[in-house]
Image (tube, grey):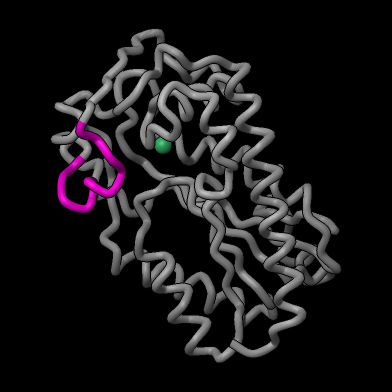
Amino acid sequence: MQILTDQNTAFELDELKPNLAFLPIGATEQHSRHLPLATDTILADVLSTEILANINWPGHVFLLPTLPISSSEENTGFKGTISFTPLTMRSIIRDIWNSLEAEGIQHLIVCPWHGGNFILKPIIRELNCEKKQCHLFYINPWELVPQEIYDTFARGFEVHCGDVETSLMLALQAEHVRDERIDNPTPHFKAPLQDMWSMHTLSEGEGHTGHPTQATAEKGELFKNAVIKSSAAYLQELLELSNIYKQY
Ligand SMILES: [Zn+2]
């Protein structure tokens, strides 16, 4: 299995005929004082390739360039956040799939590295239902990591720029992590509250919740290995199920 990208030529794709595509979704959004706006895009770029390197597929894979902007409505109110509305995201996924399908691609894996894209699940169901066949897969790497890995962090999964995400960035691209790290315990914070209030409000203007001062590259390395392993295993399961369930 070869992983083809936008660094290949059209003629190389025509010769190798990949039948599976992978779309990593990043974001351009505030990541507090210590991480760059592109954090989710950086994670998507590095980790998506690693996930694909750990699956078996009888054919070649087309790894699409990471979508650098997506739906970040909960992170508006800070400079630098650029957000698509959910309906724009719906159109983007639809248009990307239509392009791939016309080129003979059998399946598209949609993989958000930014958690705010709640429209993705309904659009994937909508497209699969419409085509009467499962063409699109959804994998959310953050949700696939086992709980015992989250238990090694300050407060489990801190959602945005806390111990987990900061540790991961220290392991992958430490040069992007600023020294200006401040803990922001926010005792009332829970991820579902972002359906009602912005991160700006919930984090009292800091842009993050949790304990980035406790982040280490060692914990990030542990998380990196776990996220690659768990996402690759789940993706493998989905690919094998697609051979069993031919209809939607
Ligand atoms: Zn992030």
Image spot of residue 47 (x, y percent): 63, 40
Q: Residue 185 is drawn in which quadrant?
A: top left
Q: Residue 238 is drawn in which quadrant?
A: bottom right
| Residue 165 is covered by the magenta coloring | no
Please report the residue visible at 66 percent of the width from the left and 65 percent of the height from the top. 21
Q: Quarter of the image containing the N terminus? A: bottom right
Asked if residue 62 lies left or right of residue 134, the reply is right
Please report the residue visible at 81 percent of the width from the left and 64 percent of the height from the top. 57
The number of numbered badges drawn on the structure is: 0
The boundaries of the magenta stretch are 188-198
Q: Quadrant for ligand 1?
A: top left
Please report the residue visible at 28 percent of the width from the left and 49 percent of the height from the top. 192
Image spot of residue 51 (x, y percent): 69, 47
Please say if 123 is above or below 69. Answer: below
Please say if 130 is above or below 238. Answer: below
Asked if residue 229 lies left or right of residue 179, the reply is right
Image spot of residue 237 (x, y percent): 72, 64
Please say if 117 is above or below 224. Answer: below
Residue nearer the viewer, 195 or 47? 195
Image spot of residue 34 (x, y percent): 37, 18
